[in-house]
Image: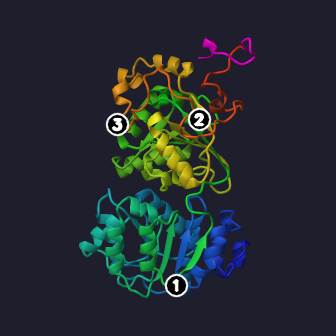
Amino acid sequence: MKDYPLTQFTDLGLNSLLLKALTAKGYTTPTPIQAQAIVPVREGKDLLGIAQTGTGKTAAFALPILHRLLLDPKPAPRHGARCVVLAPTRELATQIADSFREYGKHLNLKIAVIFGGVKYGAQIKALQGGLDILVATPGRLLDHMAQRNADLATTEILVLDEADQMLDLGFLPPIRKIVAKMSRTRQNLFFSATMPPEIEKLANELLNDPTKVSVTPSATTVEKIAQQVIFVEAPRKRALLAELFEDSSFTRTLVFTRTKRGADRVAQYLEKAGISSASIHGDKSQGQRERALTSFKAGDVRALIATDIAARGIDVSMVSHVVQYELPQVPESYVHRIGRTARAGSSGVAISFCADDERNLLKDIQRVTRQTIPTFDRRNDKGLAVMLAAMGHLPIAEQAIPEKKARGRGGRGGENRAARPAGGGGPRANAGGGESRAAPGGGEPWKRWGSGGKRPGKPNATGRPQWDPASA
């Protein structure tokens, strides 16, 4: 393809009204994917974009789409939309619609977002009048089409964003049904962070001689994210999490769990520990999710506890840390989770807790991302044992897990059950898995311990720090 160099937005042929909106936001230089994608999309070509989150891909398709609609003004089709953007989650759909509104604030375009979990009335009304841009989740849009509230026969542009997450959520059949009702002469824009075989097959079905843009290799992590793995017994994860928040630099932290119930449990625990927290997941109402996200964005809560629904659907600036309370079952999700920090060129920290039963998940993550993540061993840590013993309000099951349960994988509550009983032994950090163990030192709380996870106290005869009960 033609090389579109990293330059200025003013060199990409965009309408002056779009440039005015970009200038108001302080944007002058496009990101790599924007520099490569804007021109071919503006020219009406199909595009296949491989890009991880935080690379600026929303603007990479929103800006040239707005430019095209502005150059070819026509009435929005009743019950339809000139451009349809499909997104996997309601948070991501809302974020994309907001971006279209921001970039197109000087244009007289009708933009609406449609997703499940809310009433149909306002969505039906928006569709009846016709839309220039519709951002929707596949399931709810298909419902509207089945009820004949939506007719996409004249749609000119189709965007599939986060296609690989669509696959994970089982949205490929609805997508195919939606596409079957569209004109074959439309422009297609296809974005995915990874390209598994099923997604590649769908891309081949939809795209016609596409321009291909890949700004980073599949399933790689942002360079400006400092990544760390902490080995810890599953029952002591909560104590370790509370300890991390003793560091005031944890100002806006996303904490990921595997299950909805687990997210609520962790949020409740942090609140009891005096750490302002909120949880967000699929069982929350739309109002609850919006309030939690608004509080997190405003800095009213330090921790937002989320399931993978938020791994790609949350765009919050200045996320200082991402903590993976539990490692994801799908290794690619690791990339999307930690991609919530170090956005827009900033740096960030990603910390992952790893219990014994999660060792294989860690191996998969390091294989897929082609990296060895620095590890720290906090198993058998007396400081965490002291903190855990002080948690009298927690059930006994949270403090120690019988040996017979340690062999299982994950439970209904989303808490890992593979750790040894609190205070029990365990293999060393580099046993079996081949993970490297980072050297002790550094000012951050999670870097202070390098020998068995023990806090530094008074030097012993060897000159090395020994456990100091007062430090608990």
The answer to whether the residues at label 2 and label 3 have Cβ atoms under 8 Å apart is no
Front residue (pair 173, 201): 201
Task: Specify start and end residues of the magenta stretch as a single range.
Answer: 459-472
Q: Which residue is mark 3?
A: 413
Q: Secondary structure at mark 3?
A: loop
Q: Secondary structure at mark 1?
A: loop
Q: Which residue is mark 2?
A: 430
The magenta stretch spans residue 468: yes
Height in image: 398 above or below 145? above
Front residue (pair 392, 368): 368
The answer to whether the residues at label 1 and label 2 have Cβ atoms under 8 Å apart is no
Say whether disc 3 or disc 1 marks the residue closer to the N-terminus.
Answer: 1
The magenta stretch spans residue 441: no
Q: Secondary structure at mark 2?
A: loop
Q: Amino acid at mark 2?
A: Asn
Q: Amino acid at mark 1?
A: Asp
The residue at the far right in this view is 463
Label 3 and label 1: CA atoms lie apart by: 47 Å
